[in-house]
Amino acid sequence: MKQFIVTVAGVFVGLLLFFVGVPLLIVALIASAARPSAPPAVSVLQLDLRGALPDQDPSNALAALRTHAPSVLSIEQTLRRAEADGRVKALFVRLPEGGIAPAAADELRLAFKHFRGAGKKVLVHSQGLYASGIVSSTYMLGASGDELWMQPGAPFQVTGLASEEMFFKRFFDKWDIKPEFEQRYQFKTAVNPYLYDDFTPAHRESDLSWMGSIYNTTLAAVAADRKMAPDALRAAVEAGPYSAEQAQAKGLVDKVGQVHDAQVTALAGAGPGAKLVDLDDYKASLRGQPDASSTDPVIAVVQAEGPIQTGTGGNDLFGSTANIYSDDVSDALYKAARDRSVKAIVLRVSSPGGGDTASEQILGAVRAAKAAGKPVVVSMGTYGASGGYWISSQASAIVAEPTTLTGSIGVYGGKFAIGEALSRFGVDVRQVGVGGDFASAYSVGKPFDAKQKAAFAKAIDDVYGGFIARVADGRHMSFDKVRDIAKGRVWTGAQAKQLGLVDEVGGFYEAVDKAKSLSGLTGRSVRLKRVTAGGSPLGAFGKALGISEDGVRALATLGAVMGDPKVQGLMAQVNTARLRQQGALVLAPTPVR
């Protein structure tokens, strides 16, 4: 038995070292070799936006090892610190060739302008702007710098905004696939591609509305930053596409040149001896350096990005996808509410939606934090829609970017009945069961019967009514008024401000200012403290193997103890005495191996 315990402990310790220790060691060695301990005396920070651009850094420490993709929030917060760093003279930015999420571009535009307001230069380079995604937002971000460069001959295809949808109704009809869905209401269009063969009037109206709002917002920002008349700018871009040289001739970009030429210009403007420093490397050099006084009051930052679901992200060892787990976010909110040093909470939300029960769990934690005397201000990123709006609806205040997609106060649900389709291929779906009629409601073999359909529709109605009631209570609006602007419709942040669904239009730091105001800290310096559910890599490792964190610790400790020669000798003596009592013959103590 003793040998078995030691063997098991050794296996788990080995796995722990392999899956956790080795990656951490490799990353540490790479970091120590590749990243400077301090930036040069004169630095130009370099930010490459051509890769993935999440809204927030992962909360899982192991997930952070998988990618060096900077998040919108980390970029903004790092630039704030660089503003006060005399070594940093400028920022050099490389734009992607496609679209940046509009709200992310809005957030970074505010960061660039704040950076410039501190006397630092921002130079932006593009290797082409293609009409894919919402490229007008990418152009808007580039236009917010001191200079916007384009590579010679590169395309400038900023001509408008289009969206394409694929509809499956005729395909489903052909193969006898029956989509059985309930929507509340006509603007809740997520399942429309399964039910129709074209845009419904409501679907078309909603999409054109938010697309028009985003397009107008981006053009207005570009016109302001480039000091052009809005009508002249619109006419110029919509007459495209252009080459980089043609765009420069029309005043849409500043210079045409290779990325190397733009980098040399940025360095020359920074002064003698200036060096390019990757923004991520600069951020790494700041670790361990406080960005505020330890005596400053604390504003907790709780982050939530991705679809909302119940459970905890601790089961996802390396955080392969961005999800909002209701246990984790609600626990972080409760933790911040209990912390006496925390005076207010900023809940950063970037979510297109999710389950109603998971959303309600998080909303309950928001209410509890407010009841504990901690104002909760929601800062919306790319999305704050459907479940993302549910968890935000009763916050002390909501701040959204003008192009944040929010609202979508509605609900849908259902199933696909594929029994007839499968029968064409010789597959027969059969079901047995006991209990009430609704027990078989979610069978994929057949559609809802009339009684099941009525019961399911009522359940959808109840969720929708509960959603409206929560919004009405949180936004101090009548039930009827919320119902009129709900119906599943998506609004931009600018539209939602006019409707009363958000309080202010702005970014993360505007939300921080709102939190300071609500907690009586206006004019004072504050310390931002990220609060998470408190998971650890060790705990995640244990859950991945199906055992508790305490179990992993116990096995690791046991393995270390049993490897101690003194313990081995003692265990051998105990074993000898036990066998003598049983009448066994022991020739010599046998060491544990």
Image: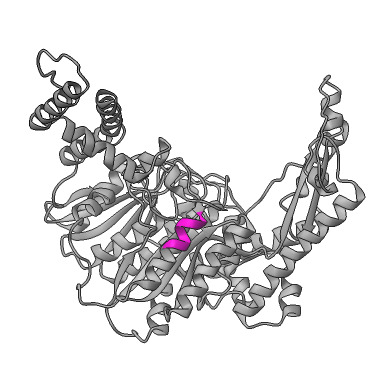
Residue 590 placement, left or right of 529: left
For residue 593, say whether it is visible: no
Query: Farthest residue in the right direction?
Result: 450
Q: Residue at x 74, y 69 (%)?
A: 465
Q: Where is the C terminus found, in terms of image quarters?
A: top left
Q: Residue at x 31, y 43 (%)?
A: 538
Residue 74 placement, left or right of 593: right
Q: Position of residue 37 (x, y in %)?
A: 13, 49
Q: Per the image, is 330 magenta?
A: yes
Residue 491 placement, left or right of 227: right
The quadrant holding residue 146 is: bottom left
Decide: is 158 above or below 577. Answer: below
> Which contiguous range is marked in magenta?
325-331
Decide: is 419 above or below 280. Answer: above
For the stretch drawn in magenta, the main secondary structure is helix
For residue 33, say whether it is visible: yes
Q: Where is the N terminus found, in terms of image quarters?
A: top left
The quadrant holding residue 213 is: bottom right
Q: Position of residue 71 (x, y in %)?
A: 39, 53
Q: Position of residue 53 (x, y in %)?
A: 43, 49
Give 117 or 106, whichever is nearer the viewer. Answer: 106
Q: Position of residue 437 (x, y in %)?
A: 85, 47
